[in-house]
Amino acid sequence: MTTSTMLSIVLVLQVSIIWQATWGEKIGCQPTEFKCSSGQCVDGGRYCDGNSDCFDGTDEPERCTNCNRTFYGLADLKYPLRLSERRSPTCTLSFVAAGGKYGDQIEITFLSFQIGTFDLDSSSCLRGYLEIEESGVSKYDKHTPRVRRRTKKKGNPRKKGVSLRAPSGSFCGPLIGQSATFYSTGDKVKLTVFVPPQGAAGQPLVPRLYLTYRFLSKTRVGHSAETVGKVVSGARCDRLLTNCHMKDCVIRSPNFPGFYLRNISCHYWIRQDSAPPGKTAQIEIFQDNDFKINVPSGHSNNDRYKPGTLTSDCAGDIVKIYDGRTNESPLLVEFCGAGPLPTIRSSGSDVLVKLISVASQTLANSRFELGVRIHFTKNSGNFLPTSEGCSVTVDGGKHPVGILRGPDHSVSSGTTCTYRVTGKKPNDKIWLYFASYHVPDLHPWTDREHCDAGKLEIIHPVPKLRHQHHHKYHKQQAVVLPTVDKIDAEMVLLETYCEKKSPRQCGHASDFTDLIPSRPCTFPEESYLSPGPEVILKMTFMSSTAIKGSGNPHFMARYEVVETTAYSEDILSNPCVISINSRDTMTGNMESPKNIFLYGRGGAKDLACKYELRGSPEQRVRVTVKQVYFSSSALCQTVYDPVVERHKCNVFHFGKFAVMNVTELWQDTRVFVGCICDSTEKFVLESLGHTMDVEFLVRNMGPRDDFRTFRFMLEYEFVSESNSCETISENRILSGSKGQLRLNLHSLQPFRCRWLLAAFPSRALYVTVNGRTFDAECKNKILFYNINNWEPYKVFCADNNHQEFFFTESWKQSSHRHFEPDLTFLEYIANEPGQFRVEWIEVTRSKPEVACLLECPELEACIGPDLACDGIRHCPVSGNDEIPERCDQFPFMTVAISSTAAVALVTFIIMGLLLRYRLVHASDKTVIPPPDMYRNDCKRSSSHKAPVR
């Protein structure tokens, strides 16, 4: 430094001393300054700081102390303060923000701190403490000091000092971190340092305190009430935040961003008053920033938990989040420590966040800030919530299909959520498959199940009237649980899953919003089927894993009530057959089966179900089509055939299609009644016999096809048979070398009659019909069917003025029909009164190698010799069966046949009499039993046997 520079500095100092001496007393020092004896003004915090700031040294008098002083300062200027030697155990430092240019609030930053010691075991201060009080501190919610018991260490306990407690809480021990800052909420702050005198609590520590203080304006540190909530009257740190969907709400600890005080309890109520229609509001609490939460845990840095993370093992301060507005609401999570907070979601529109600070703690930047947002979830219409919290009960009759999910909100530890699905009928079953399942694994380094995070139980109550062979698809072990939720069953099938083992999952179902995959979930590999009409799921939350970031236990499953009937014990049996008898009911409804395993969504490609309707012999079956819906109706059309007066199906494409074939079993032969394949108007199908079969057939179903895409409803009725079809012969099966049917009709009601014309094997029928060729004006029709074909091969209009002749179909040359009987159905359909007449004779082809006994040359056929000379002309043109040459001869053939029959009859009678005679005489003898190879000598022999004759 040069000589000129030194002279300049001395000159400035002299001028300054002269100015202070001249004008200092007249102007005076600011309230924030200390006035030296020389009139010099220095910062008030420099008084008694161990350094002489006054030129005359008056700011450092002998045995001085800055205790029991009040400090002021200009806004936005930072003042240092060091605690010098004290004269009494208690030292008070007061800071006042005088307003205006002197600021409105106070910032105090502790740079060096060592007052007393903090005892972790008792959570108390020994040999000194610091107490911080704000103006209006009485408005804080004081509480009983929170002390957590700790496990005592082995060995002789070291004698410690007496615990020291301040009314407003205390800080002691060393400073944690490089600094700790406190921001007042008012304009006054009082620091009280207490160190007991020597001998009172062992050797006291020399207090060390160095800080800076600054006075701030409200515009710099103020927070909007809309953001941090409104202060609740009667308590300074209690706040209410409402309707945070319209604004960014935050929850901040008192004195944020500085540390909060000791021995306080603060409540933060978050409430959402409205939600869109059909949705429920949920509150989410979160913090993604790693540095905005620092709540002392009460443990040392190397004890119990990893630094930089949150924990629920808190011996010091603690933050609790309740799923409701009171302390009695379920506790979702409690935490302390430092680090980010994963999203905590409430179940409803109210949340309570509570901060509890212990009475004594080390000095650190203990603070937190939590974000708040509103989540609107869609109301679920599948469940009927009960009063058991997160438990739900599903009425399968009202909600046969639905999705079961684990709670989409946070759940308190020890909570068990129960999902009970019940069918409507005793024969119902529950089909269940899981699309996802997750339980956090807190021990990934081992394969052993701990079940300490969550547990899922699947309970299948077994009906009492069932047997074990009914459950061959269930691999579980049946256990007796007589006290499980009062289940009305003699045993249950129970499965338990935790973090290592998962239930059967149909993972590809999660790719679809309704959990119906393109490839159906298979059973039993990927799904469950209950043995009875009830299934129970229990999800138990063993411990809260929300703060660990590993997520809560969760699952998503789809259930479906499968309707079965008592006709089949095995739900997967094939074919599907339902029998209905008139002895049980005379009328009722038939519906498409509700068994999902019969359809595409249950894994089936084709469906075939038969409904058998059986009446008494004097009854007919009448079916009325009420409702039909097939998703494949565009590929098939139901048409009415006016000729046969039946409904038929025209299939345009044999891809995916569905039909209902209606047939009847008449005289042991299947006869077509009608067919349905699309949505048509109501019509009636009626059998001519007492049986009817309705076959429901679906082909090439897809994964989304079920009883909703293919459904129908038919009404059945057993009615008495009409007498309109009675003829001279009461038989409906007519056979012989000749025959005829005559019917006079007077009824105005439409009806249908049927007969079976049976010819001897290798013979055909030559039929004569009183009628004409069918035309559009025909009302009464005569139809002829081959027994193997549902389409008639001859149709005539009944007309006595015309006659038609034809051979039945067996007359055609066919090698495979040589030994088959000729069977022909004859149907008569009457829509108005009229007459009906049909005649026939048996015929065979004339062969050169075999001479005909009786031939009709015009027919080129042989007829039975018994038709000769019976007074009826059977050969229509030649009359060869009634010529005089034949009829005037002696009937050798007739006599021969009659004689042979008479001899055979007499022979049978004589043999019967001889056999009866032998049986009568043999009954008088006693049968000798075979010798007893294992005779018991002790048994008394019978003496009453009759002698052998």
Image (cartoon, rainbow, N blue to C red):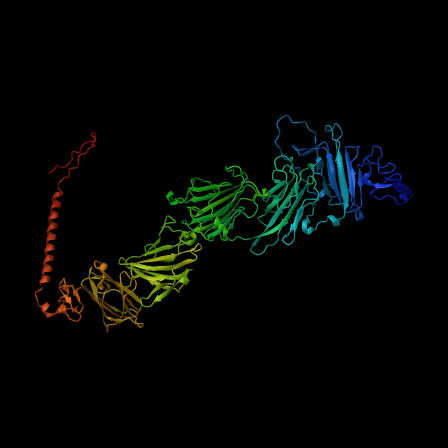
Viewer can see residue 488: no
Question: Against 102, is 744 above or below?
Answer: below
Residue 716: x percent and y percent? 35, 59
Q: Nearer the viewer, residue 944 or 82?
A: 82
Residue extending furthest toward the top: 156
In the picture as drawn, the residue positioned furthest to the left comes out as: 890
* For residue 898, side relative to residue 429 (left or right): left
Identify whether 809 is placed above or below 465: below
Q: Quadrant of residue 170?
A: top right
Q: Give residue 292's position: percent from left, percent from top.
A: 66, 44
Viewer-side residue, 312 vs 135? 312
Q: How many marks?
A: 0
Is 941 in front, or is 167? 167
The answer to whether residue 352 is seen in the rendering is: yes
Q: Could you tell me residue 461's position as x and y percent? A: 44, 44
Residue 931: x and y in percent read: 17, 34
- Split into 4 quadrants, where in the image is the N terminus? top right
Specify whether 75 is left or right of 366.
right
In which quadrant will I find the C terminus?
top left
Residue 32 location, quadrant: top right
Kindly give the residue lying farthest to the front in the view shown.
2
Q: Is residue 230 left or right of residue 893?
A: right
In the picture, measured across the screen, residue 19 lies left or right of residue 942, that is right
- Where residue 792 sits, quadrant-wise, is bottom left
Q: Nearer the viewer, residue 325 or 546?
A: 546
